[in-house]
Amino acid sequence: MAGTGSRRIGVIGLGAIARYYLAAIEELPQWRLGAVCDLRDHAAPQVADVPRYRDHRRMLREADLDAVVVTVPNDAHAPVCIDALTAGIPVCVEKPLALTPEQARGVLAAAGGSGVLFTAFHRRSNDHVRALLREASRRGEVHEVRVRYLERIEEHTGGEDWYLDPARCGGGCLADNGPNAFDLVRMFAGEVQVRAASVTRDERGTDRQAVVYLDSATGISAEVQLDWSYPGERKDVRLRFADGTSTAADLLAGFDGFKSSLWHEYRGILQDFRDAIDGGHQDGGLAALELVAAAYAAASQDGTSEDVASEDAGRAGTRVPGKERAS
């Protein structure tokens, strides 16, 4: 499968994120769209020149694909990935890999030692994140990391209500945005453990805000702020160095259109997926999912899970008193 020719790729799930994959496939010469799959006949009507399926298993059998992208609702990630990996087809899956670490380990078991499983942490491909990594390498020892992932989720769902169903999403902002945020922390701090966490939920039980504090074995402290009730959108990373200086990256800077940073990030995802296939390696996303589970457990243990009415969610505090370090 390695080489310079284009590969036939299928897209399973044609919801809000699929359009970024479809655009990247069209732009990148190493990929060629081979088939799409969605339960809804009306989804992605602009895709008209490739086979369209309602059953992903049938697509996996019939479409002669070299790889698939899985961008279905979160609760379907694990079973769809297992079906594709069992069929011997490399998988690029949207984060989170699964709803729980236990489910994720089942997916990794299906990949075995020879399958390719790649989780799409798209912020890795953000131009500003990559520039910040280069700057951090020049500047020296990182002492603190702060990641903020703030948005009003209703503006980002593309009309898909599963995001606000905690059983299908996995919980809310911590389950869905947490993996991206934790992956960013790990890029700058290495392996980390959760020290404390706070979660605020609405009347449906959906996380609206969360704050998570983490530490690395090398003494780096980190704070992750997540918000699904924020008026507007803010995604950024701030680093503080051992000498007391700091620097930051606004992940949305220069991308003036709504969600416009995603176009280049998903091009980067598919380029990295190609490299993963060529190298035969996995990047399953289990570590980020384990941090999500640990954060939920810490919030429950600390008694800092709070339920509030949805109209009050944007005003609810999520700080864990006395446990802040990275600020």
Image (cartoon, helix red, strand yellow):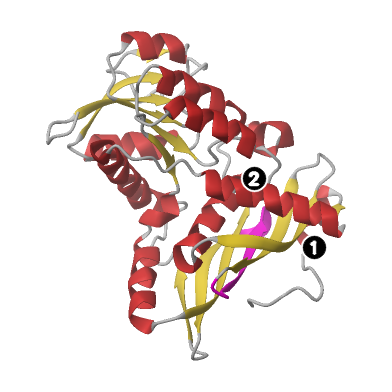
Q: Position of residue 312 (x, y in %)?
A: 83, 56
Secondary element at image label 1: helix
Q: Which residue is mark 1?
A: 315
Q: Can residue 41 be seen here? A: yes
Relative side of 171 to 233, left or right: right
On screen, residue 99 above or below 194: above
Give the residue at x 55% y 57%: 181
Q: Is residue 72 visible?
A: no
Left/right of residue 308 with respect to residue 296 in the rendered view: right
Q: Give the tally of numbered discs.
A: 2
Residue 16's spot in the image, x, y percent? 50, 36
The three-letter code of the residue at mark 1 reads Arg
Residue that mark 2 sits on: 175
Give the class, few, some or many, for how many residues have Cα within 10 Å of label 2's Cα (few <14, many ≥20): many
Lateral position of residue 55 relative to residue 231, left or right: left
Q: Is residue 117 above or below residue 254?
A: above
The dot on residue 274 is none
Q: Nearer the viewer, residue 11 or 97?
A: 97
Amino acid carrying label 2: it is: Ala
The magenta region covers: 218-233
| Image-based side of 190 in relation to 138, left or right | right
